[in-house]
C-alpha cells in the first residue's frame, strides 16, 4: 500500500492544517455528520446521493424566471440560465477583454519565473489564486459570482484555480468525484479561454445533458476502502467506467473552440475533459476555477479527504 492510500497519513496532514478545515464545522452539525474535522469522509458517511440544488430538483426553464434576482441579468444571460437544467453548462462569449486575458497570462508567467508556481500532475498549475491577488480578483469577478450564486441559490466561494499552458489531455470525468459536496450538486466551475483555441490544441470537450447521470462515487467503482486505507482501484478504472457510461447513454460530445475571453460555466456533474492534442507545438492557455457553496460539507470523494479552504 502506498502512503497516499494510507488514511492515517491524511489525518496527520489534516491535523497540521486544522484551521483550513473549520469551514466544515457548521455543515457537519447541520447535516448530522458526527466525525472529527480531520477524519476521512466519503459518500459512505451520508444517507443519500441526490443533488438538492434547486435547478436539479426542478427545471430552470420554469423556475428561474420566477426567482428574485433573475431580472438583474441581461436577456442573453437569462436565456442561458433558462437552459441550464437541460444542458448543464453555458458559454459567456467574449466575457473577459483581451487585455484582462493578457494580464492573467503575464501574471502566470511571472509566478512561474519566480518559482512560485510549478507544474503538478503533468501540465497543471495549481492554486495560482493562493499566490496572486490579481488571480484572486479574477476568481471573484462580480458578474460571474452573481450568475453562480443564482444558479445554485447559495453563496459560491472559490476553492482552487488550475492554469494550463497546453491542453489538459484529461479523459472524460465529472468534477464531483474530485471535489464533492454533501448534499451533492453544490460545486460549479468556470473555464476561461486565455487565447483563441485551435482545434488541434486539445480543446475542452463536454457531453451536454450528462450532468443528469447518477453521481459516480467511490462505492460505484472503488468500494473496498477500509478504516485505514483507500480502495485498491486506480483513477483509470474510474475513467473507464465513465467512458462505458457515456457509450451506453449515447450522449453527444461537443468541443469548445473558444475565443480568447470566452467563459464556460459547468455543472458539478457535467462530464468533460481535454481532447487529445493533435499538434504538440500549440499552446492552449486557459484557467479553471472551481467553486463550492459556502455552507455545505466540502470534501474529495476520491481520496476521502475533507477539503482545505484558505
Ligand atoms: O481544461 C481542460 O482541458 C479540462 C479541465 C478539467 O477537466 C477540469 O479542470 O476539471
Image (cartoon, rainbow, N blue to C red):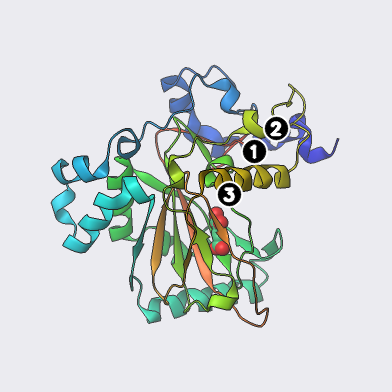
Residue 20 lies, with reference to residue 109, above or below; the image says above
- Residue linked to disc 3: 173
Q: Indicate the position of residue 217 as horizontal and vertical percent values.
A: 59, 34
The answer to whether the residues at label 1 and label 2 have Cβ atoms under 8 Å apart is yes
- Residue linked to disc 1: 302
Q: Is residue 155 left or right of residue 272?
A: left
Q: Indicate the position of residue 172 as horizontal and vertical percent values.
A: 59, 53
Q: Does the residue labelled 3 lie within 8 Å of ligand 1?
A: yes
Between the C-alphas of marks 2 and 3, the distance is: 15 Å
- Viewer-nearest of discs 1 and 2: 2
Q: Is residue 82 left or right of residue 165?
A: left
Dot 2 or dot 3: first in sequence order is: 3
- Residue linked to disc 2: 222
How crowded is the residue under tag 2: few (<14 C-alpha within 10 Å), some, or many (20+)?
A: some
Residue 29 lies, with reference to residue 309, above or below; the image says above
Residue 137 can be seen, yes or no = no
The residue drawn where x is 39% and y is 76% is: 100
Dot 1 or dot 3: first in sequence order is: 3
Amino acid at each position: 500500500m502506498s502512503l497516499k492510500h494510507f488514511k492515517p497519513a491524511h489525518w496527520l496532514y489534516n491535523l497540521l492544517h486544522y484551521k483550513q478545515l473549520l469551514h466544515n464545522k457548521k455543515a457537519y452539525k447541520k447535516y448530522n455528520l458526527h466525525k472529527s474535522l480531520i477524519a476521512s469522509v466519503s459518500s459512505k458517511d451520508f444517507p443519500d446521493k441526490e443533488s438538492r440544488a434547486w435547478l436539479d430538483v426542478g427545471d430552470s426553464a420554469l423556475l428561474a424566471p420566477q426567482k428574485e434576482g433573475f431580472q438583474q441579468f441581461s436577456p442573453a444571460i437569462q436565456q442561458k440560465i433558462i437552459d441550464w437544467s437541460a444542458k448543464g453548462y453555458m458559454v459567456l462569449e467574449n466575457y473577459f477583454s483581451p487585455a484582462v486575458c493578457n494580464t492573467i497570462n503575464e501574471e502566470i508567467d511571472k509566478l512561474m519565473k519566480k518559482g512560485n508556481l510549478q507544474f503538478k500532475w503533468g501540465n497543471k498549475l495549481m492554486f495560482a489564486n493562493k499566490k496572486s491577488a490579481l488571480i484572486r480578483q479574477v476568481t471573484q469577478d462580480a458578474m460571474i459570482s452573481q450568475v453562480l450564486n443564482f444558479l445554485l441559490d447559495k453563496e459560491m466561494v472559490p476553492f482552487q484555480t488550475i492554469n494550463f499552458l497546453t491542453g489538459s489531455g484529461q479523459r472524460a470525468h465529472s468534477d464531483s468525484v474530485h471535489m464533492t459536496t454533501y448534499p451533492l450538486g453544490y460545486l460549479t466551475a468556470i473555464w476561461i479561454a486565455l487565447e483563441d483555441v485551435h482545434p488541434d490544441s486539445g480543446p475542452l470537450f463536454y457531453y451536454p445533458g450528462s450532468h443528469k447521470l447518477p453521481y459516480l462515487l467511490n462505492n460505484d467503482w472503488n468500494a473496498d476502502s477500509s478504516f485505514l486505507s483507500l480502495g485498491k482501484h486506480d483513477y483509470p478504472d474510474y475513467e473507464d467506467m465513465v467512458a462505458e457510461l457515456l457509450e451506453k447513454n449515447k450522449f453527444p460530445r461537443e468541443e469548445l473552440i473558444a475565443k480568447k475571453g470566452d467563459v464556460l460555466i459547468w455543472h458539478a456533474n457535467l462530464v468533460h475533459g481535454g481532447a487529445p492534442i493533435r499538434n504538440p507545438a500549440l499552446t492552449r492557455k486557459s484557467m479553471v476555477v472551481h467553486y463550492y457553496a459556502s455552507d455545505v460539507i466540502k470534501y474529495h470523494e476520491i481520496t476521502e479527504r475533507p477539503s482545505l479552504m484558505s
